[in-house]
Amino acid sequence: MSVRIGVITWPGSLDDRDAQRAIRLGGGEPVALWHGSHDLEGVDALVLPGGFSYGDYLRSGAIAALSPIMSEVKDAAGKGMPILGICNGFQMLVEAHLLPGGLIRNDHQHFVRRDQKLTVENNDTAWTNEFRRGQEIVIPLKNAEGGYVADDETLNRIEGEGLVAFRYAGVNPNGSLRDIAGLTNEAGNVVGLMPHPEHATEAGFGPTTSAAMRSGIDGLAFFTSAISAVSRVAA
């Protein structure tokens, strides 16, 4: 069975084609979707890609979270469809209240771009099941408004319920509270993170590792995890 994963494009999206390529490399079939549509075209999973939707006007992801297709995204999330929000997509997920908290300007007030170490905190989700809990991975990061924030009650709840999917390791690049780099919802089908796994899926184009320059492909497991999750349900 071919697993069809939709990638939604907004005005200002710039990593949608990269996400489509990552899906293809993972063995899935990418399906291009448009923010102004109400049709998910029968896809099995969704990716909300990185970029600067609507120029990050008001707040990053705030306008995109109100776009027509988000009605279908919310409905699909409630029905258990795997949904991944990457960077700007993560910002959309919190603005749409599909994940808790918010994302604000980096504490140093600068755009940051680096190959970022992450620790896998939760490998029991549709997008992380091929990782090991506690595994350290390297995923490219690029953002200006990536600081994760929430009140103490929310932070304690997500910690207690195991909803932190990833933490920054080695260095906290943007001031995110409790080093939170990514979250999952209670059901484990919706995951959001600031780093860009789609940029670490093909040898020769990923982060540099001890083995070779640009050889890192830690991001590929996000997409193979989702394909495996969908395939198990279908079986």
Image (cartoon, rainbow, N blue to C red):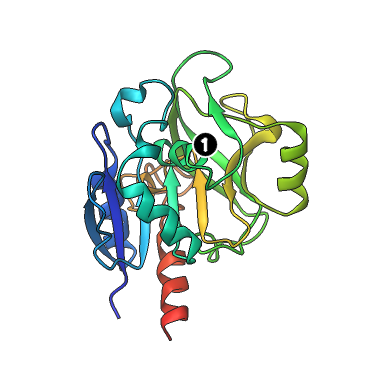
Residue in front for this viewpoint, 98 or 147:
98
Residue sitting at x 72%, y 39%: 154
Q: Position of residue 150 (x, y in %)?
A: 67, 32
Residue sitting at x 77%, y 37%: 153
Work out which quarter of the rendered image holds the N terminus and state it.
Answer: bottom left
Q: Residue furthest bottom?
A: 235
Residue in front for this viewpoint, 151 or 216:
151
**Vertical placement of residue 172 versus 9, above or below:** above
Residue in front for this viewpoint, 206 or 224:
224
Q: In the image, 24: left or right of 196?
A: left
Q: Position of residue 60 (x, y in %)?
A: 42, 27
Residue at the spot of label 1: 116
Q: Position of residue 219 (x, y in %)?
A: 43, 52
Residue sitting at x 30%, y 45%: 68
Work out which quarter of the rendered image holds the C terminus and state it.
Answer: bottom left
Q: Position of residue 74 (x, y in %)?
A: 44, 53
- How packed mark 1 is, by other alpha carbons closer than 10 Å (few <14, some 14-19, many 20 or more), is many
Q: In the image, 225: left or right of 147?
A: left
**Vertical placement of residue 138 versus 135, above or below:** above
**Vertical placement of residue 113 versus 160, above or below:** above
Can you tell which quarter of the image residue 57 is in? top left
Residue type beneath disc 1? Gln
Question: Considering the numbered disc 1 on the image, is that residue within a helix, a strand or a loop?
Answer: strand
